[in-house]
Image (spheres, rainbow, N blue to C red):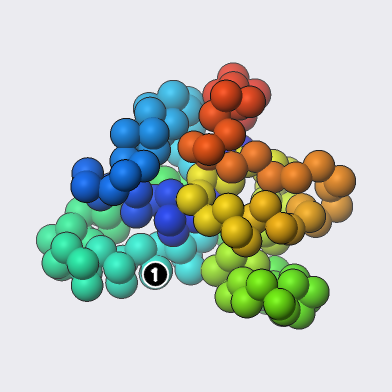
Amino acid sequence: MIIADTSGVLAFLDAGAAEHADCVAIVDRIERPMLISHMVIAETDYLLTTRFGLTAANRFLSEVARGSWELAASDAHDIDTVVTVNTRYEALKLGATDCLNIVLAARYGAKTLFTLDHRHYRAIVPLGKPEPFLLLPADQDHWSPYKHR
């Protein structure tokens, strides 16, 4: 299971992004859609709309609706845990979206994140797990798509 972060999704969608080819290669290698939170969808929609226009944003939303990205469920308890994570890592100024990705990783047993946000996710200890997150595409040499079915 892989949790998608806004930065990874944007680099995947933006052919002009420096990391675009690496992100496309990761998405092409996985056998099931990545998990994506409603918060990541909202951030991605906003950034696509402001940078590339409504057509690009609607294309992304249509792909989500078709199942290209798996919607991750979250509830009030998850948001309460977001507050705890945000408080624990106050100095990092994570924000709710990054914190929810951490909470969802714990809920779904995911240790892999699709992100370019190394500053935040390298500094965080995953909830309930001693080993650090694997960040794609940066850590792709240490990753196998067959372990993430």
What percent of the width, then of the height, locates residue 76?
A: 68, 76
The answer, for residue 107, to whether it is visible in the render is no
Q: In which quarter of the image is the C terminus?
A: top right
> What's the residue at 35%, 63% (across, down)?
44
Task: Decide which of 93, 78 is in the foreground and name it.
Answer: 93
Residue 60 as seen in the image, left or right of residue 105: left
What percent of the width, then of the height, locates residue 52?
A: 17, 63
> What's the residue at 27%, 54% (across, down)?
60
Task: Give amino acid for label 1.
Answer: Ala
Task: Choose top left, top right, bottom left or bottom right for residue 18.
Answer: top left
Disc 1, SS: helix
What percent of the width, then of the height, locates residue 118?
A: 58, 53
Task: Decide which of 134, 44 is in the foreground and name it.
Answer: 134
> What's the residue at 62%, 77% (across, down)?
93
Against 70, residue 6 (above or below) is below
The answer, for residue 59, to whether it is visible in the render is yes
Disc tally is 1
Task: Choose top left, top right, bottom left or bottom right for residue 133.
Answer: top right
Label 1, on which residue? 42
Task: Decide which of 124, 65 is in the foreground and name it.
Answer: 124
> What's the residue at 71%, 77% (across, down)?
91
